Image: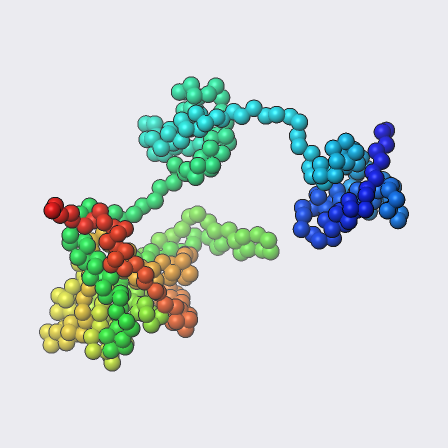
């Protein structure tokens, strides 16, 4: 075997020692520096290690030591410290023209019989259109990843129609309400409701063991439905949740009665909610005598979110938190559901979790300008 002799100057030894001691370089660079320091046969080396001893101490092969010494002898110190560049030149299969065609193809409608593009479908279509002789779906994946394209994903939104004066009128009213400062005599309450299906297991789940996840059966048993009423005061970090068996006008009116009792010291309660058919003053008169109904109605100021604008209701944020932290599981009994939701409500109230609404009327007039009517001068 060819023997490569490493001879380091004093400056080179100081440079390699700083690399090995400071720890600011990659592990391979540090390892190569230790190899060169150990194999140095110069005058400034107090002792020299053999390849066998270096291999044993550094836990590397002797071929690795010979490769580093060879790069030092023929290419210099810098090349010896870094990884050798491969000599093989790979031809680029996807050029700019093919990449542009794949992007345009993924942005078009999928072929008939398919709801969306897939990686394999794009690869087959590129070959069918003679863009390239052959290409794998993994190569297509790299093109889409590079350009941040995901044609297989869909997002669902409630999109309001363009230039809708009714929408913007209700939206700006809600945004003005959210700008009001906190006032215990005039609290701002957001209310929303959501159905919940009670689901039971058909078989006992397999509990999780160390290092493994629990296993649940795909099959389930329907145990009926219920309704979740939620009201929150964003600026005070307070919320109320009630579980009912039905979603009727009487249930809604009784829930508002509980809100009025909770805020008995308030002069007027501003209630932000959507335009559900039960959310109307007439529900009071179908639940209570006229005197009580009118008295209860006078306690509230109703502010309705616009149609297709339920995202303006802060109570929807609390509902998403409730589902994510508490209800994202199978619960078959309504009593168990009430117990779990009550515990979640107390936990959130104890944390005083507030919601700071930052979307203002000025922001809406810029970002949602397409909804505003245009005027010709």
Is residue 114 among what the camera can see?
no
Colour scheme: rainbow
Where is residue 174? Give x, y as percent.
Answer: 22, 62
Rendering quarter of residue 301: bottom left
Position of residue 241 measured from the top left corner of the image (x, y, whole percent): 32, 67
Residue at the image point whose x is 21% and y is 59% from the top: 172
Query: Is residue 145 rendered to the left or right of residue 199?
Result: right
- In the image, 62 versus 160, the foreground residue is 62
- In the foreground, 121 or 51: 51
Q: Residue furthest bottom?
A: 265
Q: What residue lies at 69% left-to-right and 37% top-to-bottom?
A: 83
Does residue 272 sit above or below 147 in this rendering? Answer: below
Query: Residue 315: image x %, image y %?
Result: 30, 62
| Quarter of the rendering containing residue 376 | top left
Q: Is residue 32 above or below residue 245?
A: above
Front residue of 208/89: it is 89
- Residue at 27% across / 75% down in the picture? 183
Residue 183 in view: yes
Question: Position of 107 compared to 136: left or right?
Answer: left
Estimate the x, y position of residue 138 in percent, counting from the top left.
50, 31
The mark total stands at: 0
The N terminus sits in image quarter: top right
Residue plotted at (26% across, 66% down): 179
């Amino acid at each position: 075997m060819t023997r490569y002799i490493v001879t380091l100057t004093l400056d080179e030894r100081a440079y390699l020692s700083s690399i090995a001691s400071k720890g600011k370089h990659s592990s391979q660079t540090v390892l190569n520096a230790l190899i060169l320091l150990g194999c140095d046969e110069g005058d400034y080396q107090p002792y020299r290690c053999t390849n066998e001893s270096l291999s044993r101490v550094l836990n590397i092969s002797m071929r690795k030591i010979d490769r580093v010494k060879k790069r030092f002898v023929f290419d210099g110190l810098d090349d010896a410290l870094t990884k050798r560049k491969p000599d093989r030149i790979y031809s680029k299969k996807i050029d700019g023209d093919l990449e542009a065609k794949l992007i345009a193809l993924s942005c078009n409608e999928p072929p008939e019989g398919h709801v969306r593009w897939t990686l394999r479908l794009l690869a087959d279509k590129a070959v069918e259109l003679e863009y390239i002789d052959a290409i794998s779906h993994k190569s297509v994946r790299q093109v889409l990843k590079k350009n941040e394209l995901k044609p297989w994903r869909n997002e669902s939104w409630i999109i309001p129609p363009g230039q809708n004066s009714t929408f913007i009128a209700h939206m700006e009213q809600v945004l003005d309400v959210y700008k009001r400062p906190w006032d215990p005599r005039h609290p701002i309450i957001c209310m929303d409701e959501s159905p919940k299906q009670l689901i039971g297991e058909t078989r006992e789940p397999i509990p999780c063991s160390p290092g493994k996840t629990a296993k649940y059966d795909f099959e389930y048993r329907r145990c009926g439905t219920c309704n979740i009423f939620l009201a929150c005061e964003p600026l005070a970090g307070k919320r109320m949740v009630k579980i009912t068996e039905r979603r009727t006008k009487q249930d809604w009116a009784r829930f508002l009665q509980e809100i009025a009792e909770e805020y008995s010291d308030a002069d007027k309660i501003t209630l932000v909610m959507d335009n559900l058919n039960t959310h109307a003053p007439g529900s009071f008169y179908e639940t209570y005598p006229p005197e009580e109904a009118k008295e209860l109605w006078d306690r509230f100021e109703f502010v309705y979110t616009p149609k297709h604008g339920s995202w303006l209701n802060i109570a929807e944020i609390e509902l998403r938190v409730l589902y994510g932290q508490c209800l994202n599981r199978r619960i078959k009994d309504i009593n168990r559901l009430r117990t779990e939701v009550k515990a979640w409500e107390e936990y959130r109230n104890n944390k005083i979790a507030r919601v700071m609404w930052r979307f203002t009327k000025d922001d809406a007039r810029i970002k949602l300008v397409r909804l505003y009517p245009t005027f010709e001068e």
